[in-house]
Image: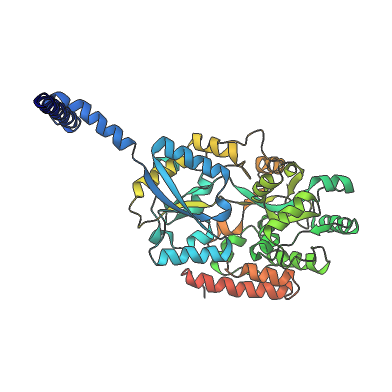
Amino acid sequence: MRHYKFYYFSLLASLLFCALLLVGCNSSSEEETTSNGEGDTDNNSTDTEEAAEDEITEITLLMGEADDTEGFRAVMNAMEEDIGIKTKIELRPGGPEGENIVKTRLATGEMSDIMLFNSGSLLMALNPEKYFVDLSDEPFVDRMMDSYKEVVSSNGKVFGIPEGSSQVGGWLYNKRVYEELGLEVPKTWDELMENNEKIKEAGKVAVIGTYGETWTSQLPILADYYNVQAEVSNFAEEYTAGTAKFANTPQAQRGFERIQEIHDRGFMNEDYTVATYDQGRKMLAEGTGVHYPMLTQALQNINDNYPELVDDIGVFPQPSDDPDVNGHTVWMPNAYLINKESDKIEAAKKWMEYFISDKAIELYESKSKSIGPYVIEGVELPEDSYTAVKDLVPYFESGNVAPALEFVSPIKGPNLPQICTSVGSGQLIAEEAAEMYDDDVEKQAKQLGLDWD
């Protein structure tokens, strides 16, 4: 029995000694990692720097639902891996509802670190100097074309970077149906109306209407601006000064007349008052509807949902009444803007620098094709661009393009979608709409502090 006790105590002592030895080794290891002793200073500093580089900074971003594309997500994933910035995305609806959300969050101080919003007049209406960070001195801004800087600047300060490529507002059309019916791209408004009659006689929808989303009703008047400025070169300047009006400028009022004519001649689908943007793109892709006055941004969704049909879609400018006046109205990309109240401004600037880098643009293009030419210096359209985008190249190369009115004037009345919807559904005639829009514009001009008598 005594032998067993001796063995037991010997074993216990051995285990205790080993335990103490292991504790000593662990203590020694922890001290080596955190020590500031002379022999370990360089190694410890390197370890600390590597740990810091591995840290992730989270940036919040408010953007429209339609802007959350596969290309955008690819860039966000690469950005997190390359520079350690993770993007938490907050989605909002488009149109007036989304604009109201933006305004409310800015006013209440609840805006995200970065937000995506319109460039041009709608941005100016937000008072960018009050809410957003001035980027004028940032080196990455030098990559942006002057034409884009102008639409994101106020009082000489630059506030945004482009979301992607430019785009045009024109008439998307189904090339396959055009070929089947033996139609040619129209150069005048009368030729377009003749095509519409032939399409209608063939039992198809000539002009797709999607007034279920009222913003889509504006395109025939917005896309007509190339024609307006071609005939009245100083319209934007006088419009901003309050001397030129839609009701007293026949070339400007013509846009409302075009919407009225489309309605009066019964060219739209029967359910145009409730049809949605998604339904419109489906009709165009499948060829049940042949013309869709729309921005070329619609190509992205068509490619996502009907990739085998996207190359059937082309685009031509809104025709004027003169065959010698034929060109595209161009929309500049939306802008990413940094919230002045963000506590991550420096990280947000790094986010922007990365977003318009060559690597990011190439990655974006590999997942989400451009919907028009880029506004970044040195970036060209790839060979596999959409057919409709390739249709744009001759117009851009010849200079037969003009920025939409909202990019050359700070004024765009907020009720234009509702007014256009009323004209397109037969509730207003063009003359009444022009006068109503002039009143709407005057109210906005006063809100912007413009000196209108």
Is residue 182 visible in the rendered image? The answer is no
Q: Position of residue 189 (x, y in %)?
A: 79, 57
171 above or below 308?
below
Q: Position of residue 248 (x, y in %)?
A: 67, 71
Q: Residue at x 65, y 66 (%)?
A: 214
Instruction: From the viewer's side, name the closer residue of 247 and 51.
Output: 51
Is residue 252 visible in the rendered image? The answer is yes
Say which quarter of the image contains residue 428: bottom right
Q: Residue at x 64, y 57 (%)?
A: 233
Q: Residue at x 75, y 64 (%)?
A: 258
Horizontal side, residue 169 vs residue 191: left or right:
left
Horizontal side, residue 362 vs residue 273: left or right:
left
Instruction: From the viewer's side, name the closer residue of 375 and 339.
Output: 339
11 above or below 268?
above
Say which quarter of the image contains residue 341: bottom left
Instruction: From the viewer's side, name the closer residue of 371 and 308.
Output: 308
Q: Residue at x 72, y 71 (%)?
A: 423
Q: Position of residue 242 (x, y in %)?
A: 56, 69
Say which quarter of the image contains residue 236: bottom right
Image quadrant holding the N terminus, namely top left
Q: Position of residue 86 (x, y in %)?
A: 42, 44
